[in-house]
């Protein structure tokens, strides 16, 4: 028997990532909504077995939608999945009748909660794989990785594993024979990171980065060289990287880049802004030269 799961999130990429992970179960089918109001309507009409709501959505937010749904379907479990995870939000959601509140980047925990709420029993959490960065997008060993708190390591891994950073590396990195020489001083330290990604953009990169790690984990006996061989690269890993590229691109501008040339051009514009002097050089005064020309001008009366 199929179990219907309603996913309400205004961010297309995150909604697709959650849907893909949930529909790995053959007997789960996902229904999508792009805001809280649409979630209330679809929940009323389709009566899903479980509902997953983002907290911050246009038209109607997740908590308001949860209040309306609880009035109509009090027995249907609701899960809030948000980047604004904190005890205050969790407490407020529990008062409404929400079963669980989870941080958005942790899709594995979300799948486990859905399994438990659907009566299939909780999934035993698997240890998360070590965040290794491939040779094509790695941080020099002389520079320690970013702290793991608040998903920082996962976000940095995602950016460094994207086509955006690879395009920068191909342009800026030196080579030894056919191999790239990744320098912390000449490549990593001067790489223009996204200026101020929103919480949702950051969560999208983290979720997509975890998707890449999950795709790699499906081939435990393969090396990175095996996985990233252009002729044999698994289709699931190709798709995961495509979603990661889209998420990282959107941290830089509102639409994805068409190719690596556009990415490099955009990065060099950012780099020029970052390296420009804080105070612009003063313009040279033309007053003196004007005065000299006036003095040297022949007298018309003569």
Image (cartoon, rainbow, N blue to C red):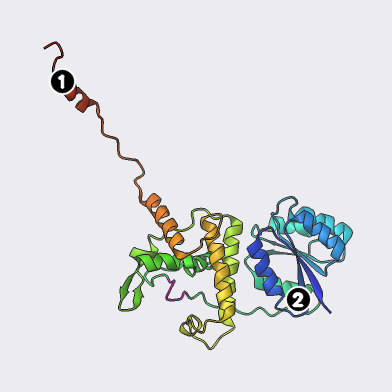
Q: Is mark 1 on a helix, strand or loop?
A: loop
Q: Quadrant of the N terminus?
A: bottom right
Magenta run includes residue 259? no
Q: Where is residue 258 in the image (x, y as percent from the top left)?
A: 51, 62
Instruction: Indicate whether residue 135 is drawn in magenta.
Output: yes
Q: Quadrant of residue 110?
A: bottom right
Question: Is 137 situated left or right of 249 in this image?
Answer: left
Asked whether the viewer can see residue 286, the reply is: yes
The single residue placed furthest to the top in the displayed view is 301
Q: Which residue is drawn at 43% across and 62% down?
A: 261
Which quarter of the rendering shows the C terminus?
A: top left
The CA distance from mark 2 to mark 1 is 92 Å
Q: Is residue 112 above or below residue 6?
A: below
Q: Where is residue 299 in the image (x, y as percent from the top left)?
A: 14, 15
The answer to whether residue 149 is seen in the rendering is no
Dot placed on the residue nearer the N-terminal end, 2 or 1: 2
Residue count near mark 2 (Cα–Cα under 10 Å), binned few <14, some 14–19, many ≥20:
some
Left or right of 277: which side holds 129? Answer: right
Which residue appears at 84% of the width and 55% of the height?
Answer: 68
Measured as percent of width and height from the top left, residue 25 is found at: 73, 79
The dominant secondary structure in magenta is loop
Label disc, if present, on residue 115 of the rendered structure:
2
Position above or below: 223 against 153? below
- Residue beneath label 1, please? 297
Q: Quadrant of residue 214?
A: bottom right
Q: Residue at x 35, y 68 (%)?
A: 173
Judge left or right: residue 263 versus residue 214: left
Q: Please tell me whether residue 286 is drawn above or below residue 276 in the rendered image.
A: above
Mark 1 burial class by Cα count in 10 Å: few <14, some 14-19, many 20+: few
Q: Report the span colored magenta.
A: 133-138
């Amino acid at each position: 028997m199929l179990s219907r799961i309603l996913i309400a999130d205004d961010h297309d990429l995150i909604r697709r990532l959650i849907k893909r992970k949930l529909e790995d179960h053959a007997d789960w089918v996902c229904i999508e909504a792009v805001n809280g109001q649409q979630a209330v309507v679809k929940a009323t009409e389709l009566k899903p077995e479980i509902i997953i709501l983002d907290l911050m959505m246009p038209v109607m937010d997740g908590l308001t939608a949860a209040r309306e749904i609880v009035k109509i379907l009090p027995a249907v479990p609701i899960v809030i999945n948000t980047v604004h995870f904190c005890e205050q939000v969790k407490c407020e959601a529990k008062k409404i009748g929400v079963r669980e509140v989870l941080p958005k980047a942790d899709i594995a925990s979300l799948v486990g909660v859905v399994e438990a709420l659907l009566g299939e029993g909780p999934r035993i959490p698997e240890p998360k794989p070590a965040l290794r960065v491939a040779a094509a997008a790695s941080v020099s060993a002389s520079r320690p990785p970013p702290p793991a708190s608040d998903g920082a390591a996962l976000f940095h891994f995602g950016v460094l594993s994207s086509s955006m950073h690879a395009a920068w590396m191909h342009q800026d990195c030196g080579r030894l024979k056919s191999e790239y020489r990744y320098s912390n001083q000449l490549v990593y330290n001067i790489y223009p990171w996204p200026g101020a990604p929103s919480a949702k953009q950051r969560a999208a990169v983290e979720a997509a980065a975890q998707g890449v790690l999950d795709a790699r984990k499906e081939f435990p006996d393969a090396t990175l060289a095996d996985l990233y061989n252009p002729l044999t690269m698994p289709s699931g890993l190709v798709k995961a990287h495509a979603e990661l590229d889209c998420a990282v691109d959107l941290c830089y501008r509102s639409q994805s880049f068409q190719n690596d040339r556009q990415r490099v051009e955009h990065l060099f514009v950012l780099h020029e802004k970052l390296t420009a002097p804080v105070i612009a050089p003063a313009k040279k005064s033309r007053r003196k030269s004007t005065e000299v020309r006036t003095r040297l001008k022949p007298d018309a009366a003569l």
